[in-house]
Image (cartoon, rainbow, N blue to C red):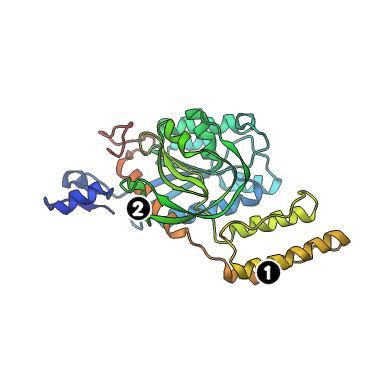
């Protein structure tokens, strides 16, 4: 919870200038501890549907231990679902109509798989933009993850993503660019984030359209950025919500696709993710796969049990801190009525008074 500047101690002003949340006594006395309602628009494919739920729920649950968080998962039309996944959605997810009726304090939009070269050609494009347009007018802040970042930036700012020569895949270190922004207060100035994507929106294009880049990597590009107002839209280009084994599962999936003949090239290792011991295990496993494929033998068992002890999560603490900062700022400016985005006196064009 924020500090209260109950005296004129200069330290309070210094911390405020560094991006810390400092409340005046008048502002503090008018704050009520209350519940918050967070929407999760889950567009991930069936295999990752429930894992994505757990990942974002886990990050939200690790935030401020005083506020009570209600997370409302929902999805949209235009996404092909298996009967099992649809049954899960029908049983546990809310409808967008109910979401609109009840309101939200904040919204997270997950990534999604695409099948077309142009995002507006996707069947989910219009439903997604309908959700975003409603949220921008009625929700305090919208956090976009990976594909959602690309889609919303194209829709709102006209910036189309660029296809990369090779998949951006692995764990990359990032540097905080603007240390005074409240979203990056009290986080490491250098931190890791997993990436897994074929496309990118570049820092220069973001900044040309007024977006504020908060953290970026020389290897992986921008990870964290915000809309020109500083808060109403938060963009993740990486996947800080990933579990420690998420990239391992992706690697297994790609190896399986090679064995089945769905891709021609054996997948490379995710960058900066496997240590030398794991690389040795998987180099040997590649030879087993190639032999099995050549001889029409059964696919050898994936050696997951041999590598788990070597897989490290080097991004979770920073991810928690950023999400905690985000929801803390939402709490600071959101209306008591979750159908309204801001409390009285908050400027929608500069909600954090930056």
Choose mark 1 or mark 2, whichever is in front.
Answer: 1
Residue 305 position in % (x across, y down): 65, 70
Of all residues, the one furthest to the left in this rendering is 8
Q: Quadrant of residue 151?
A: top right
> Are there few (<14), some (14-19), or many (20+) residues within 10 Å of tag 2?
some
| Element class at badge 2 | loop
Residue nearest the viewer, comparing 6 with 322: 322
Residue 25 position in % (x across, y down): 16, 47
- Picture layout, residue 111 above or below residue 175: above
Residue 17 position in % (x across, y down): 24, 46
Q: CA distance from mark 1 to mark 2?
A: 45 Å
Do tag 1 and tag 2 residues touch (Cβ < 8 Å)?
no
Left or right of residue 140: residue 255: right
Left or right of residue 67: residue 155: right
Q: Which mark is residue 243?
A: none
- Picture layout, residue 216 above or below residue 249: above
The quadrant of the picture occupied by the N terminus is bottom left
* Dot placed on the residue nearer the N-terminal end, 1 or 2: 2
Residue nearest the viewer, comparing 85 with 328: 328
The quadrant of the picture occupied by the C terminus is top left
Left or right of residue 103: residue 145: right
Q: Which residue is disc 1 drawn over? A: 281
| Element class at badge 1 | helix
Residue 193 position in % (x across, y down): 49, 54
Residue nearest the viewer, comparing 83 with 277: 277
> Are there few (<14), some (14-19), or many (20+) residues within 10 Å of tag 1?
some
The residue lying at 52 percent from left, 38 percent from top is: 201
Q: Quadrant of residue 297?
A: bottom right
The residue lying at 60 percent from left, 47 percent from top is: 91
Q: How many marks?
A: 2
Q: Which residue is disc 2 drawn over? A: 67
């Amino acid at each position: 919870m924020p500090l209260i500047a109950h005296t004129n101690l200069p330290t309070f002003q210094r911390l405020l200038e560094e991006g810390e949340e400092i409340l005046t006594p008048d502002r503090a006395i008018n704050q009520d501890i209350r519940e918050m309602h967070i929407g999760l628009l889950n567009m991930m494919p069936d295999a990752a549907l429930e894992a994505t739920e757990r990942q974002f729920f886990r990050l939200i649950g690790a935030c401020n231990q005083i506020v009570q968080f209600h997370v409302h998962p929902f999805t949209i039309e235009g996404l092909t679902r298996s009967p099992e996944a649809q049954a899960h959605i029908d049983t546990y997810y809310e409808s967008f109509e109910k979401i609109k009726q009840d309101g939200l304090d904040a919204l997270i939009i997950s990534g999604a798989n695409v099948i077309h070269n142009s995002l507006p050609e996707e069947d989910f494009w219009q439903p997604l933009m309908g959700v975003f347009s409603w949220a921008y007018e009625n929700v305090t802040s919208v956090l976009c993850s990976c594909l959602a970042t690309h889609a919303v930036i194209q829709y709102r700012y006209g910036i189309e993503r660029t296809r990369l020569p090779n998949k951006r895949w692995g764990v990359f270190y990032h540097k905080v660019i603007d240390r005074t922004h409240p979203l990056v207060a009290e986080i490491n100035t250098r931190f890791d984030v997993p990436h897994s994507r074929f496309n990118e929106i570049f820092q220069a294009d973001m900044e040309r359209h007024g977006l504020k880049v908060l953290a970026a990597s020389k290897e992986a590009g921008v990870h964290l950025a915000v809309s020109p107002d500083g808060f109403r839209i938060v963009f993740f280009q990486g996947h800080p919500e990933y579990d420690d084994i998420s990239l391992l599962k992706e690697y297994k999936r790609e190896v399986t696709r090679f064995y089945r003949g769905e891709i021609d090239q054996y997948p490379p290792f995710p960058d900066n993710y496997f240590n030398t011991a794991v690389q040795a295990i998987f180099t040997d496993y590649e030879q087993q796969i190639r032999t099995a494929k050549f001889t029409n033998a059964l696919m050898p068992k994936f050696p997951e049990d041999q590598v788990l002890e070597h897989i490290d999560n080097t991004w979770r603490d920073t991810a928690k801190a950023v999400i905690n900062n985000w929801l803390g700022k939402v709490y600071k400016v959101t209306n008591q009525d979750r159908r309204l985005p801001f409390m009285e006196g908050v400027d929608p064009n500069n909600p954090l008074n930056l």
